[in-house]
Image: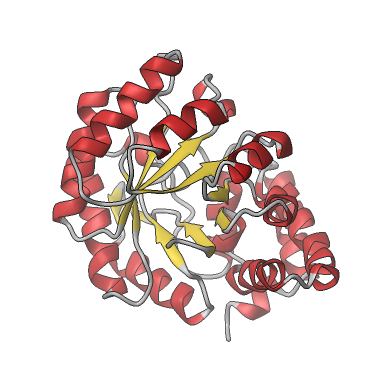
């Protein structure tokens, strides 16, 4: 089962091409820092700007570099069911351990449409699915009743819940649905309600911190978790001070792992916001930790 601190990894670019050596170096660093799973080709990885060949390349490179040390949950979602099925099949061929599959964005399907979408993906891959509910990005909120219908299909590993709703997480957990937080700031409250971990943006630049937080929550040491959450909350604020993944990649660049390069329409941080980000990284020892 996928649990603990799982990173939604940024994709490094070099001249608009995937920087494979940088990606492989980042994978090794994450594993050394205690990250318990890697999600390539998520929102944070700028997958919306990838060709299918690039998506296959990134998943394949991550799978090869991980070499079985932690699970690889490949981002393979789409607002087209046919395309989501195709991407899921490709991720399975490439050796991923699971698939992160988002609710269809822009289309705004009703509950039956959501169920039929995920049913089609479920029927076309043997890999466990992590459903991804992020209403702020997609314009549609998958309610626990719909999640329960999909869960009953079998081989659903979890739902990445980024609705921000503790009530919604509670309703899922009491129905026996495994939840992963999709919001760093909600990791502690969601895990207190029974979530199994987080798929994290902050883990891109503070992986040991996120591992320590999820370990503390999992062990029931909520005094320690609250102290760690203070730091996570501050880093989350700067990590989302601009459109994700702009600040996360700027932080990874500051750590020396990748170029500060994006795919349009995503652009680099303005200087003022970058200085606030770097100040937070220095304050909490993130820059020094990267050298360890």
Q: Say which quarter of the image contains residue 95.
A: bottom left
Residue located farthest toward the left when viewing the structure as drawn: 93
Assign the N terminus to one quadrant of the image: bottom left
Residue at image x 35%, y 77%? 69
Q: Say which quarter of the image contains residue 114.
A: top left
Q: Nearer the viewer, residue 187 or 203?
A: 187
Question: Relative to 19, is 257 on the left or the right?
Answer: right
Assign the C terminus to one quadrant of the image: bottom right
Q: How far across and down, in percent of the image, does residue 46 sit?
A: 41, 42
Q: How far across and down, in percent of the image, does residue 50 sit?
A: 29, 39
Residue at image x 48%, y 82%? 32
Q: Is 87 rendered above or below residue 277? A: above
Q: How far across and down, in percent of the image, does residue 36 sit?
A: 48, 70
Can the viewer see residue 84 in this picture? Answer: no
Q: Nearer the viewer, residue 186 or 234?
A: 186
Question: Relative to 5, is 71 on the left or the right?
Answer: left
């Amino acid at each position: 089962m996928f649990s603990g601190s799982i990173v939604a990894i940024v994709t490094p670019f070099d001249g608009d091409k995937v920087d494979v050596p940088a990606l492989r170096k980042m994978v090794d660093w994450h594993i050394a820092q205690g990250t318990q799973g890697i999600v390539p080709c998520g929102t944070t990885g700028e997958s919306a700007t990838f060709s299918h060949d690039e998506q296959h390349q990134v998943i394949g490179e991550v799978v090869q570099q991980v070499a079985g040390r932690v699970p690889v949950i490949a981002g393979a979602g789409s607002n087209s069911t046919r395309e989501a099925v195709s991407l899921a099949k490709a991720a399975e061929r490439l050796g991923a351990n699971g698939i992160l599959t988002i609710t269809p964005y822009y289309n705004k399907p009703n509950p039956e449409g959501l169920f039929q979408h995920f049913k089609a993906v479920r029927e076309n891959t043997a890999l466990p699915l992590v459903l991804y509910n992020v209403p702020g990005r997609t314009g549609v909120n998958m309610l626990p009743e719909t999640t329960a219908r999909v869960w009953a299909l079998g081989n659903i590993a979890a739902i990445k819940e980024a609705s921000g709703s503790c009530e919604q997480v509670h309703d899922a957990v009491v129905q026996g649905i495994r939840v992963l937080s999709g919001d760093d700031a909600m990791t502690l409250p969601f895990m207190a309600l029974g979530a199994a971990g987080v798929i994290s943006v902050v883990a891109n630049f503070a992986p040991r911190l996120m591992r320590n937080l999820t370990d503390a929550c999992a062990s029931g040491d909520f005094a320690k978790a609250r102290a760690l959450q203070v730091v996570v909350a501050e880093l989350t604020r700067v990590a989302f001070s601009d459109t994700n993944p702009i600040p996360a990649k700027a932080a990874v660049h500051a750590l020396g792992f990748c170029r500060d390069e994006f795919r349009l329409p995503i652009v680099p941080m303005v200087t003022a916001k970058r200085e606030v980000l770097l100040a937070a990284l220095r304050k909490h020892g993130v820059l020094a930790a990267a050298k360890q």
